[in-house]
Image (cartoon, helix red, strand yellow):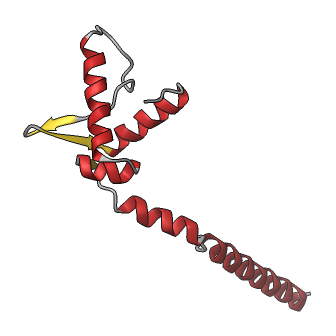
Amino acid sequence: MKQSTYLMGAVLVGLSVVISAFILSNSTNIPNSDIDSQNVNSSIPDLMTITQLADYLQISEQSIEIIISNDDSLREGLSSYDTYQFIPYVLLDNQKRFMKTEIDAWLKYRNDNRLNY
């Protein structure tokens, strides 16, 4: 009886080690596409210049300036508007800066509301 208990315990311990190794090996495998997207996202700063924003959005700096100009003219005539209706930016030392999280929210708003330039 004692030997069968030891044998059963050894089998359970061995089985749990094999299952644990399988779970750990699957959790550390990241597909190459995920690694590539992580590398791209890690190279994008949290606070971007117009040049960096143009690279991030894959459009020209001139297009961004046009969007800002159009948004600023439309915003002047409004007393209230949705937060992400216009491209969000801050002025730091008279230079426009764009927060990545705000730009992502603006893009989502534009997509959800099907707004185009």
Instruction: Tell me the quadrant of the picture where the C terminus can be found.
Output: top left
- Work out whether 94 lies above or below 47: above
Instruction: Tell me the quadrant of the picture where the N terminus can be found.
Output: bottom right
Viewer-side residue, 64 vs 83: 64
Viewer-side residue, 52 vs 65: 65
Answer with left or right where residue 50 lies relative to residue 9.
left
- Work out whether 55 lies above or below 61: below
- Residue 105 location (% of width, % of height): 42, 35
The residue located at (85%, 89%) in the rendering is 7
Seen from this angle, which residue lies furthest bottom? 3
Question: Where is residue 91, by image quadrant?
Answer: top left
Question: Where is residue 40, by image quadrant?
Answer: bottom left
- Residue 99 location (% of width, % of height): 29, 42
Seen from this angle, which residue lies furthest right? 1
The residue located at (20%, 35%) in the rendering is 90
The residue located at (30%, 10%) in the rendering is 78
Residue 88 visible in image: no
- Residue 38 location (% of width, % of height): 46, 63
Viewer-side residue, 103 vs 31: 103
The residue located at (52%, 33%) in the rendering is 111
- Work out whether 102 lies above or below 59: above
Seen from this angle, which residue lies furthest left? 93
- Work out whether 56 lies above or below 117: below
Residue 114 visible in image: yes
Number of marks in picture: 0
